[in-house]
Image (tube, helix red, strand yellow):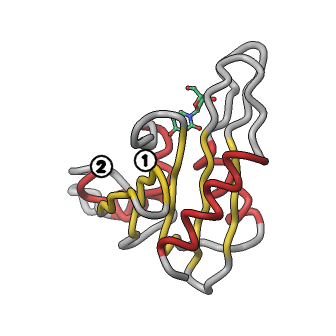
Amino acid sequence: MEIEELIEKAINAKNNQTYTPYSHFNVGCAVEMEDGSIYTGGNIEIASYSPTNCAERTAIFKAVSEGKREIKKIAITGDADYTFPCGVCRQVIREFAKDPIIVIANSTNDYKTFTMDEILPHSFGPEDLTRSKNGE
Ligand code: THU
């Protein structure tokens, strides 16, 4: 899918799929998986704030729970001027992507793209668990 189309889906998620009664800060996300399927989500807030789920994790977990495992592109849009994923979400993207295009969008004609390594350098990921230096 074209980047602009994926951004439109993220904007739609920001406008229609959030639950933000506490911060009123809305974020939307759309992910395109390896098979071309699209999943969207918004941030969901909880009164005892810590269980709050970011838009990125809502969308990614919907995909993973449907059996999808690899993100091709991910578009994120929020109320900040360029809303970047939080640290936790960067690690979640890392888990389910090999070489994703990460799109941080204000609109369909105002966005920036990043690689995984740019937003999470020197990361730890699934392969590291089988890379023990003790040969175990
Ligand atoms: N939030 C996201 O959904 N994604 C981000 O990348 C940053 C923060 C949400 C969490 C919370 O509901 C609100 O934004 C304010 O932190």
* Quadrant occupied by the C terminus: bottom left
The residue where tag 2 is placed is 120
Residue at 50% x, 71% y is 4
Left or right: 59, with 98 as reference point: right
SS assignment at label 2: loop
Q: Is residue 136 visible?
A: no
Query: Contact, CB < 8 Å: mark 2 with mark 1?
Result: yes
Residue nearest the viewer, comparing 136 with 68: 68
Q: Quadrant of residue 31?
A: bottom right
Q: Earlier in the sequence, mark 2 or mark 1?
A: 1
Task: Quote the CA–CA distance across marks 2 and 1.
Answer: 7 Å
Three-letter amino acid code at disc 2?
A: Leu
Residue at 67% x, 73% y is 38
Q: Is residue 83 visible?
A: yes
Residue 96 in picture, x, y percent from top left: 51, 64
The residue where tag 1 is placed is 90
Q: Residue furthest bottom?
A: 35
Q: Residue furthest front?
A: 109
Residue at 39% x, 69% y is 101
Q: Which mark is residue 121?
A: none
Residue nearest the viewer, comparing 104 with 95: 104
Residue nearest the viewer, comparing 52 with 125: 52
Compared to residue 74, the image places residue 90 above or below, namely above
